[in-house]
Amino acid sequence: MLNRAPPTALGRAFAPNLFDLAALALVIGVLVIVTYGAHQANVPLTVLDSTPISLDPRHLPEYALRTTLRMLAAIVASLLFTFVYATIAAKSRRAEMVLIPVLDILQSVPILGFLTFTVVFFMNLFPGRVIGAELASVFAIFTSQAWNMTFSMYQSLRNVPKDLEEATQSFHLSWWRRFWRLDVPFAMPGLVWNTMMSMSGGWFFVVASEAITVGDTTVTLPGVGAYVATAIKEQNLPAVGYAVLAMLVVIIIYDQLLFRPIVAWADKFRFEQTASAEVPTSWLLDIFRQTRFLRTLATELSGAIESTTRIRLPLPDFSRIKFPIIVPSRAIDAVWIAIIFFGATSLGWMVVQFIASSLNWSDVETAVIDGLYTLIRVTILIALASLIWVPIGVWIGLRPSVAEKIQPIAQFMAAFPANILFPAAVVLIVHYGLDANIWLSPLMVLGTQWYILFNVIAGATAFPGDLKEAAKSFHLSGWKWWRYVILPGIFPYYITGAITASGGSWNAAIVAEVASWGDTKLNAVGLGSYIAKATEAGDFQRVILGIAVMSIYVTLFNRLLWRPLYAFAENRLRLG
């Protein structure tokens, strides 16, 4: 009773001020927008046919709103997926043996590969309603966002400093409380930047996710992506310009209302022993911090949520179970590997039987050779992107004030769909008689190079200030500073960015190796154009063959190059 606040003090704490009114207006606005989106998703499917996409710019605000709601829904689903999937993969060695290779395969499966099978599935869940097509679109955007975020959190959890792990053990924290007290806060800086990248990267595939054509099934949802697809089809350059302007406005809005507040809030989770010289700011976060009613309410809610982290879930303690026969850990590993091998072999045999029902070895040879062309493109483009963006990312990340200004620009560049550049690329290639196999290649990396930049910025931003001061005191500069200080510090983040950029480039090959402007179409030899043509024709056997070959290439590339570098970063370049 003595610890309770007087009623008058509680009354003053809950009395709203002007900042409460401003924050409340924003919250109500968000709720209204979400309600509108839910209502539009529940209308009959015939509405899509009766209201085709209009290139009148007056419709762009509504289209932009619908697209943004789909991307926000996908990013929420991606975040939940990341927390569960990355944590299990990082904490369980045996689960990691399955989950990480599966993640390699998932990020290599092109968005058209998912759409080929998910459109019919979701539409059958809600027959005759728009919500089925909306869920198919959201799932397609989810597949362009989730893998990057999952790799980021997985990398962070595998590199938690050992002294922090020992601290949680000494305090006897439950796994649930450790997750919210250590794992999530430590992963937060990198996860925030990768969430921004995923949100922006979703724009790259928004055209394919809103203007869906699989065989005889065509679904066009109101949105910026469908608007762009219609503008390209009708060769309407002013409409393309309007779409770019609408994207810029949307990116600025969600940068100010969503990501900048999150970046400023997540700065407190940086791992260092000295105070940060420059702290990112957000006017929206400042408004919420100066509210009275909302802050008091948030304090009460956070206290209630905090109490849930102290709950020890009654999970069985298998360590106390005594078996009459002690089974060696190696024997368990052998059995587990045998189960994985049997499952993978069975699944592979099912795929082979499905493909062999109408294809032969010459088709397999064609897909493999086309995959080699795409592999060469991806390797060269990732190397060039690394040489360009690693120094720039370090320079930006070490200067929070610069990062704050660059952030919306980088988001816009990352969100800029390569599809919009296809008309210019097609016109220039045709006009100058250039080789499409070479000059369509840069379109593959336009949307994925930003994974490298954003991850390097995240690594440089999270680099401990005390280590920077130590390097300064030892007068390290030039190449020595790069070799012994910053490159080891950002290397785990770079590997995460390079893996996702590599997988994203394979994915982007679907749209980059096939470019069109009106009736003029250009094709580059590669696995991307192979899958795109098969999808358009509704040839499911060749779609599966192309996806299988692409998954094999990506998995081998990751296992032979990126995973050894990942292990090196984890074992040799770990803080603490």
Image (cartoon, rainbow, N blue to C red):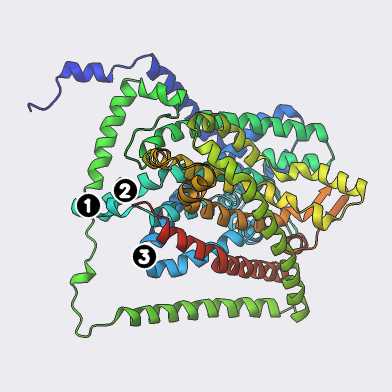
Left or right of 440? Residue 417 is left
Position of residue 478 in the picture relative to residue 221 (left or right): left
Q: Which element type, helix, strand or loop, lies under badge 2?
A: helix
Q: Position of residue 434 (x, y in %)?
A: 88, 52
Question: Hey, which quadrant is residue 349 in on the image?
Answer: bottom right
| Residue contact at pointers 2 and 3, CB within 8 angstroms | no
How far apart are labels 2 and 1 at the CA level? 10 Å
Residue at the extreme left: 2
| Residue 449 seen anywhere in this rendered image of the structure | yes
Q: Amino acid at mark 1?
A: Leu
Residue 51 image offset from top left, x and y in percent: 72, 38
Asked if residue 518 can be seen in this view, the reply is no
Cα distance between the residues tagged 1 and 3: 18 Å
Q: Earlier in the sequence, mark 2 or mark 1?
A: 1
Query: Label 3 is placed on what type of residue?
Result: Ser
Cα distance between the residues tagged 2 and 3:
17 Å
Q: Earlier in the sequence, mark 2 or mark 3?
A: 3
Q: Residue furthest bottom?
A: 325
**Tag 1: Cα neighbours inside 10 Å, few (<14), some, or many (≥20)?**
some
Q: Nearer the viewer, residue 87 or 165?
A: 165
**Front residue (pair 474, 312):** 474
Task: Please state the horizontal and vertical placement of residue 9, each as a whole percent of the image.
Answer: 19, 18
Q: How busy is the neighbourhood of tag 2: few (under 14 within 10 Å), some, or many (20 plus)?
A: some
Residue at 80% of width from left, 56% of height from top?
A: 438
Above or below — where is 441 with respect to 284?
below
Q: Are marks 2 and 1 in contact (CB under 8 Å)?
A: yes
The residue at which mark 2 appears reads as 182
**Among the 4 quarters of the image, the one containing residue 422:** top right
- Residue drawn where x is 88% and y is 50% of the image: 520
Residue 173, which numbered label? Answer: 1
**Which residue is identified by label 3?**
92
